[in-house]
Amino acid sequence: MGKPIRRKVTRRALLQAAGTGIVGAAISKLAVPWVRSASAQGARTMTIALINDVATLDPFNTYDSVALSIERGVYDGLVGFTRDMKLRPELATSWEASADAKTFTFHLRPNVKFHDGTPLNAAAVKLNFDRVLDPANRLIRRSLFEPISTVDAVNDTTVRFNLKAPFGAWLYTLAHPAGRIISPAAIGKGGDFVARNMVGSGPFRFVSWTPGQQVVLERNPEFWQGGPQVDRLIIKPVPEDASRVAMLLSGDAQFVHPVPNVQADAVSRARNVTLQKQWSNVQQDAQMHCQHEPFRNPLVRQALNYAIDKQALVRVILGGLGRVMDSPVASVITGYSVVQAGGWPYDVAKAKTLLAQAGFPKGFETTMWLSNSTE
């Protein structure tokens, strides 16, 4: 099933005003963040309530979307995504790929400085990717950038990535929000500093992080794409759904994400509240280890797909804010193509037949690991 772009949308809606610019096969959901038109703290301050706190502010060591969305307000990548998931230039203004898709050369945007005054250059880009690739640093995003063989600083404004094998999707990998460029001066202060302080070149500068309470960002008037339309962001972790909604309705927050689907209709009718909808690029799905029995057998995997009433999940759990997937990826993702029109229907008889053909006429037992979200 396909998940909402929730955190992706959160980041985008959060930073779109700043001029800045994510991603999963079963049910695809509509993104449903809410924005209040009036600000509780003045026209230039926005309070944002998100579902989780962050564990680290190091994009190369971040795995959760909430933290990535916050980091995305401070950091730029070489390339990024537009609102409709198209590639766009950020710190790189142009690039070329070799015919064998093993060498990618990027030309950097001139006169860009990090928030600490350090200039952006090819050496800074190389340092960032050398850091994530060094196994001694134990950064969890190392696997994402594993295709890299070496990174060369050709000159101050040109950086070249040499890959271990042809990889046509390399630009999309670099556009991932984990692929942000950190100030080399900040990196020089060590991993603990990078984990607790953000020094990038993006639309907002880092002010403070009080774990469990808030992250504060301020406007970067020297942002290469123009300064944001708000002066200050106060981002608070609010795990309880009802509390986030209450903050929005009271005006204590101007942006909250996510809001329970069952409250979407009621909240959208509240005064001075805008409901934003767009199809997600993330999906909710059941992921199986295909190298382990019984999931090695495709008949078992097909049986599970027929055994789940996805339309009922969309109707009851998502409040109609979703649709059944017809592909392993959501429709907004580059490369999307329909695998089975209309998705896989709910057909218990067919599921039982497939299980019997796979050698499990009485079914089997397995353990499922789930998140602790309301849904």
Image (cartoon, rainbow, N blue to C red):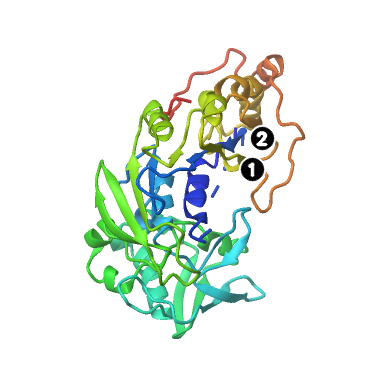
Across the whole image, how many numbered discs are drawn on residues? Answer: 2
Question: Residue 141 placed where, x, y %?
Answer: 40, 56
Report the side of 95 relative to 109 (left or right). right
Q: Which residue is mark 2?
A: 325
**Image quarter for residue 299?**
top right
For the residues labelled 2 and 1, say whether their Cβ atoms are less than 8 Å apart: yes
Question: Residue 25 placed where, x, y %?
Answer: 61, 37
Q: In whole angstroms, how far apart are the C-alphas of marks 2 and 1?
A: 7 Å
Q: Where is 233 relative to 264, above or below? A: below
Q: Amino acid at mark 1?
A: Ala
Question: Crowding at label 2, few (<14), some or many (≥20) Cα neighbours within 10 Å?
Answer: many
Residue shown at 28%/73% (left/top)?
185
Secondary element under disc 1, as helix, strand or loop, is loop
Residue shown at 54%/24% (left/top)?
266
Report the side of 373 relative to 131 (left or right). right
Q: Where is 86 relative to 114, above or below? A: above
**Image quarter for residue 310?**
top right
Q: Nearer the viewer, residue 152 or 123?
A: 123
Q: Nearer the viewer, residue 1 or 208?
A: 208
Q: Quarter of the image for the N terminus: give it.
A: top right
Q: Where is 21 relative to 304, above or below? A: below
Q: Amino acid at mark 2?
A: Met
Q: Which residue is mark 1?
A: 330
Question: Residue 142 placed where, x, y %?
Answer: 40, 58
Question: Residue 162 placed where, x, y %?
Answer: 51, 74
Q: Nearer the viewer, residue 166 or 375?
A: 375
Report the side of 370 relative to 333 (left or right). left
Q: Residue furthest right?
A: 341
Q: Where is 250 relative to 198, above or below? A: above
Residue shown at 41%/72% (left/top)?
222
